[in-house]
């Protein structure tokens, strides 16, 4: 039986927009308040369409993010692969949570991502970040309900399956 999949270009476009939002130039202090756009888009698609978006998409998005922001090649790829794996494994639970619980889950997933980034930075001798480093998962958690509603509306509007 052949299953027709629609809207692959919407998924790609959402990742492109997230990558572009990631490189928006900001003053130094505002960079810590900037959400983890790519990770949030990845979490959304992993819980909405786990049969289409998973670890390999997370790895590819992470490689693009590594190249874009100039980090160690594979650093974000590893972190986003782990986030995608956890999101995909827990997608049935996360989908049934109310938005505030989903937001808390996103906070935990993005904190895992930040921990992995700090771990790699420690191995490569990069300077350690202060307490402000941990604010972006919190900001991402706060905007998750809006992000979820926006992406769900786009997915339904363009019938992405």
Image (spheres, rainbow, N blue to C red):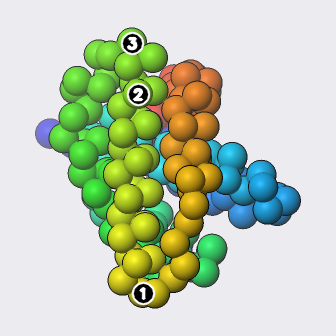
Closer mark to the observer between disc 2 and disc 1: 1
Q: Give x and y (percent) for residue 155.
A: 51, 30
Q: CA distance from mark 1 to mark 3?
A: 39 Å
Whether residue 78 is visible, yes or no, is: yes
State how far apart marks 3 and 2 are (Cα). Answer: 10 Å
Q: Which percent across, then down, holds residue 89? A: 18, 41
Q: Quadrant of residue 25?
A: bottom right
Q: Quadrant of the C terminus?
A: top left
Give SS at disc 1: loop
Image quadrant assignment for residue 77: bottom left
Q: Residues within 10 Å of mark 2 (few under 14, many from 20)?
A: some
* Count of numbered circles in the view: 3
Q: Residue furthest bottom?
A: 125
Looking at the picture, does residue 69 appear above or below residue 36?
below
Between 41 and 143, the one nearer to me in the picture: 143
Q: Closer to the N terminus: mark 2 or mark 1?
A: 2
Residue drawn at 55 percent across, 22 percent down: 145
Q: Are marks 2 and 1 in contact (CB under 8 Å)?
A: no
Q: CA distance from mark 2 to mark 1?
A: 30 Å
Residue 90 locus on image (x, y percent):
21, 34
What is the secondary structure assignment of the residue under circle 2? helix
Q: Which residue is mark 2?
A: 104
Residue wearing tag 3 = 98
Q: Nearer the viewer, residue 129 or 83?
A: 129
Nearer to us in this view, 93 or 103? 103
Q: Earlier in the sequence, mark 1 or mark 3?
A: 3
Q: Residue furthest top?
A: 98
Q: Which residue is mark 1?
A: 124
């Amino acid at each position: 039986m052949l299953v027709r999949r629609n809207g692959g270009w919407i998924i790609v476009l959402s990742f492109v927009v997230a990558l572009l939002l990631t490189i928006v130039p900001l003053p130094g202090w505002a960079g810590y308040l900037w959400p983890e756009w790519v990770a949030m888009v990845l979490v959304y698609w992993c819980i909405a369409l786990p049969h289409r978006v998973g670890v390999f998409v997370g790895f590819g998005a992470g490689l693009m993010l590594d190249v874009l922001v100039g980090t160690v090649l594979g650093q974000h790829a590893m972190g986003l692969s782990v986030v995608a794996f956890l999101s995909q494994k827990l997608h049935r639970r996360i989908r049934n949570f109310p938005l505030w619980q989903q937001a808390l889950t996103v906070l935990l997933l993005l904190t895992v991502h930040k921990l992995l980034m700090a771990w790699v930075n420690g191995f490569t001798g990069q300077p350690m970040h202060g307490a402000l480093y941990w604010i972006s998962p919190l900001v991402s958690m706060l905007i998750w309900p809006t992000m979820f509603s926006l992406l769900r509306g786009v997915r339904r509007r363009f019938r992405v399956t």
